[in-house]
Image (spheres, helix red, strand yellow):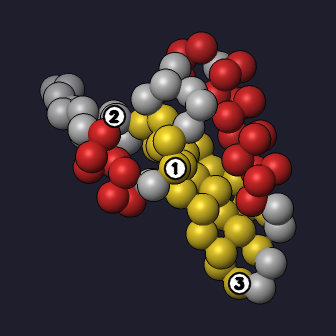
Amino acid sequence: MKKLITPKTDAELLKTHPITSKIKGWFIKVAETSNNAFIVEAIDRYGRSVSKRGNDPIILQREIENDLYNFPSLR
């Protein structure tokens, strides 16, 4: 049996992922896990997420947005 997923509102997503992505419907969070080590995570209204780890959050965010743009099924 399939479970229906209720999409979250922008206000709900902005509480946990405060950066609005350039890709419509996606929101981003940057977390520093240790000294100069970051996790950048993007999430959409349906709970799908994409994340990357590295030492430059700006580059990581740009890479995630490029990945989202290149995968039309995620938009």
**Residue behind mark 3:** 34
The percent coordinates of residue 72 (x first, y second) are 59, 14
Tell me if residue 54 comes above or below residue 22 in the rendering: below
Residue 40 position by quadrant: bottom right
On the image, the x and y values in percent for residue 32 come to 65, 75
The tag earlier along the polypeptide, 3 or 2, is 3
CA–CA distance between discs 1 and 3?
A: 21 Å
Work out whether 17 lies above or below 31.
above
Q: Residue at x 26, y 49 (%)?
A: 12
Q: CA distance from mark 1 to mark 2?
A: 17 Å
**Which mark, by number, is residue 19?**
1
How far across and down, in percent of the image, does residue 58 sit? 77, 53
Give the secondary structure at mark 1: strand
**Residue lying at 50% horizontally and 42% vertically, measured from the top left:** 20
- The residue drawn where x is 59% and y is 31% is 22
Q: Earlier in the sequence, mark 1 or mark 2?
A: 1
Taking the spot 60% from the left edge, 69% from the top edge, the residue there is 31
* Residue at the spot of label 2: 46
Judged by depth in the image, the label closer to the viewer, 1 or 2, is 1
